[in-house]
Image (cartoon, grey):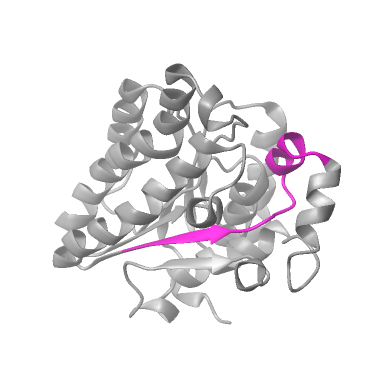
C-alpha cells in the first residue's frame, strides 16, 4: 500500500523508543514524515537510532522528553512543539503501561497511576494538540488501545479498564472534532511481541493464549504500525470514530 501522502507531514508519536511505538516511528520515517518522538527517558542508543533514521530516509526527527505522569510536562512540551511548527498533521498516542492486579487487590494508587498514563495524560495531550489542528481545519489522531479494553483480561483490571476508556472516548472525540476536519480512531492490538508483553505475562499463559488465535502466533510490532500508518494516510479518509482490532483472529474464536 502506498503511504506517499505522509511525506513531509509533521507527526507526533508518544512512547516510541521501544515496542510498537518504535515500529511506528520507523515506518513514519520510511515514508518521509517528520516526527516529534516523545519519550520519557532519552539515552545515547535512542539518539543514535534516530540519527540513522534521519540519514537513511532524509527526514527530520526531534526527540522530546515527555513525562506523561506530570501534566506540567505535557503542557510545557506541547507548547515547545507548537513553537517549532505551525502545523501538526498526525498525533499517535502510543505510550502506555501495564500492571497485573486482580480487581479486589487493585489499590487506589495503582488505579490512578495506570489511568494517568494510559488515559488522562493522553486526553490532556490530545486536547492541546487538537486545538492547533483545529486552527488548520485538518488533522488525524490515533490512539493505541488494546483488545484487553474490549474483552477484559483476567488479573489486569486497571489496565483493561483504562484501555476500554480510550476506545469509548474515541467515539465521542471523533464526533466533536469532525467539525474541524479532524479524524480520530484507535487501534487495538492483541498479543504482540513486545518487551512489555513478555515481562508481564508468564510463558505458560502466553502459549495457552496463542492457541486461541486463529493464526496461531503473536503479532510482530510492524504489523501493528502499518495499520497505524494506514489510518494516518489518505487511504483511510472515510474512516472516523472506529476501533480497528488487530489480533490475528483471537476475537473471533
Q: Nearer the viewer, residue 220 or 59?
A: 220
Q: Is residue 95 visible?
A: no
195 or 236, which is in the foreground? 195
Residue 94 visible from this viewpoint: yes
The stretch drawn in magenta includes residue 190: yes
Could you tell me residue 171's position as x and y percent? Answer: 29, 61
Quarter of the image with the N terminus in it: bottom right
Task: Using residue 235 as the reference point, say whether residue 141 is left or right of it.
Answer: left
Expressed as whole percent of the image width and height from the top left, the position of residue 118 reads: 45, 38
Q: Residue furthest front?
A: 104
Compared across the picture, whether 229 is left or right of 206 comes to left
Q: Is residue 107 left or right of residue 184?
A: right
- Observer-nearest of 197 and 178: 197
Residue at image point 59% right, 35% down: 98
Q: Which quarter of the figure is the C terminus placed in?
A: bottom right
Residue at point 73% right, 60% down? 220
Q: Is residue 208 above or below residue 223?
A: above
Magenta segment boundaries in residue numbering? 184-202
Residue at the image point whose x is 74% and y is 40% from the top: 201
x, y percent for residue 9? 41, 62
User: Left or right of 203: which side holds 85?
Assistant: left
x 24%, y 56%: residue: 173
Q: Quadrant of residue 49?
A: top right
Number of numbered discs visible in the structure rendering: 0
Q: Quadrant of residue 179?
A: bottom left
Q: Is residue 36 above or below residue 185?
A: above
Residue 204, image x and y in percent?
85, 45
In this rendering, the answer to whether 88 lies above or below 83 is below
Task: Say whether residue 67 is magenta.
Answer: no
Amino acid at each position: 500500500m502506498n503511504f506517499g501522502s505522509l511525506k513531509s507531514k509533521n507527526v507526533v508519536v508518544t512512547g516510541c523508543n521501544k515496542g510498537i511505538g518504535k515500529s511506528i516511528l520507523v515506518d513514519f520515517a520510511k515514508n518521509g514524515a517528520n516526527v516529534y518522538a516523545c519519550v520519557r527517558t532519552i539515552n545515547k542508543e535512542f539518539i543514535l537510532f534516530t540519527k540513522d533514521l534521519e540519514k537513511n530516509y532524509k527526514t527530520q526527527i526531534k526527540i522530546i522528553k515527555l513525562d506523561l505522569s506530570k501534566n506540567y510536562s505535557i503542557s510545557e512540551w506541547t507548547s515547545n512543539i507548537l513553537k517549532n511548527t505551525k502545523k501538526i498533521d498526525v498525533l499517535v498516542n502510543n505510550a502506555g503501561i501495564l500492571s497485573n492486579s486482580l480487581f479486589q487487590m487493585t489499590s487506589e494508587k495503582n488505579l490512578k497511576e495506570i489511568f494517568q498514563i494510559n488515559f488522562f495524560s493522553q486526553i490532556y495531550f490530545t486536547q492541546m494538540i487538537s486545538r492547533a489542528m483545529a486552527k488548520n481545519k485538518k488533522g488525524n489522531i490515533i490512539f493505541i488501545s488494546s483488545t484487553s479494553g474490549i474483552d477484559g483480561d483476567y488479573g489486569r483490571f486497571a489496565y483493561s479498564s483504562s484501555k476500554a476508556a480510550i476506545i469509548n472516548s474515541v467515539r465521542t472525540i471523533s464526533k466533536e472534532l469532525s467539525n474541524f476536519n479532524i479524524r480520530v480512531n484507535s487501534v487495538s492490538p492483541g498479543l504482540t511481541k513486545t518487551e512489555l508483553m513478555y515481562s508481564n505475562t508468564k510463558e505458560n499463559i502466553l502459549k495457552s493464549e496463542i492457541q486461541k488465535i486463529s493464526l496461531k502466533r503473536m503479532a510482530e510490532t510492524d504489523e501493528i504500525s502499518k495499520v497505524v500508518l494506514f489510518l494516518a494516510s489518505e487511504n483511510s479518509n472515510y474512516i472516523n470514530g472506529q476501533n480497528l482490532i488487530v489480533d490475528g483472529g483471537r476475537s473471533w474464536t
